[in-house]
Image (cartoon, grey):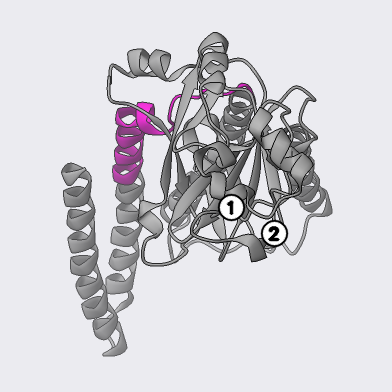
Amino acid sequence: MYGFLIAVGVLLLLSIIWMVYRIQTLVSVVKGSDKKIATGSNKVNAILFVLFLLGTGILMFWYSIKEFDNYQLPVASEHGVITDQLFWITMAVTGVVFLITHVLLFIFPYKYQYKESRKATFYPDNNKLEIIWTVVPGVVLAGLVISGWMAWSDITAPAPEKAHVIEIMGYQFAWDVRYAGKDNVLGDYDYRLTSAQNSHGVDFSDKNSIDDFPSPVVVIPKGEPVLFKIRARDVLHSVFAPHMRLKMDAVPGMPTRFWFVPTKTTAEMREELGNPEFNYEIACTEICGRGHNGMRKVIEVVEPAAYQKWLSEQKSFIQNNPALAKGLESDVKELAEIQ
């Protein structure tokens, strides 16, 4: 990284020196010097364009190859593979266009530098050429957009019926997690019920809420669909799990969702990376206040059998805090005791 910064600094210094030289040349021309000064200046300009192209091109390719493995984190979800494919297809298409246009941009000043003997060609228009450079980019971009739209439609489509339902709620400055329990159905919530004992605002008069339970860590099974139901309690947040290629805004008053299938357990990813301390995580990628950088939640991906064992060991909100059952109807209390 330091080498890259030094190279940029050198280029900036050379640019400043060149600008000083250019100003001196222009002053000489204004004072009435002959055309040889302008011609010489153009030639120097043209050569510098080519040198700049070669220098920055070599630097770009060297840095890209050196840091290639750091461009993307290892993928750990089924849809993430498709997302990465779309990314690299887009990168290839735009990269080729970028290289062609910028090579021409720097070569043309050299090839067509000023010469007294040269006359410009009158070339007002070319309908065929204009049709080509309008239609071809349009078709290519349409293909990229349609491919992305199809992938996004699959990701945001309704989750499979057997998907494990988990609620992710953001607030300044943390994430709270609620599992749907044995019935795999989240109970209702009401922001007016939010309190120190009920941070989710869960409505325990809804029987579907009785078996809901909290967790300090997001535990999910490998190879099975998981549905995140996402909401925010105060301001705009954004759920981001980079290894899962998952990103979805958490908007107050407008619940969102995102479902995916994890493909690597935490243990497998630790082995792949050679890092025994690695953890998947959820981070907030929407600046939400002073504590924004601390909004993180660990995701632990385990084998299905281990997940079922973990589920059986969890206690519901009411089991953890019986006071939450106060004021509930007798049949709901009875159900809570059964749970």
Where is mark 1, residue-wise?
A: 200
Badge 1 density bin: few <14, some 14–19, many ≥20, Cα 10 Å: many
Tell whether position 70 is magenta.
yes
Q: In the rendered picture of this protein, how many numbered marks are placed on residues?
A: 2
Where residue 82 sits: x, y (%)? 64, 26
SS category of the residue bearing label 1: loop
Tell whether position 254 is magenta.
no
Q: What stretch is highlighted in magenta?
A: 54-78
Query: In the rendered view of the protein, which quadrant contains the C terminus?
Result: top right
Give the residue at x 29% y 80%. Answer: 26
Marks 1 and 2, the one that precedes in the sequence: 2
Q: Magenta span: helix, strand or loop, mainly? A: helix
Where is mark 2, residue-wise?
A: 190
Name the mark on residue 101: none
Q: Do the residues labelled 1 and 2 touch (CB within 8 Å)?
A: no
Which residue sits furthest top?
305
Query: In the rendered view of the protein, which quadrant contains the N terminus?
Result: top left
Rendered position, 338 above or below 136: above
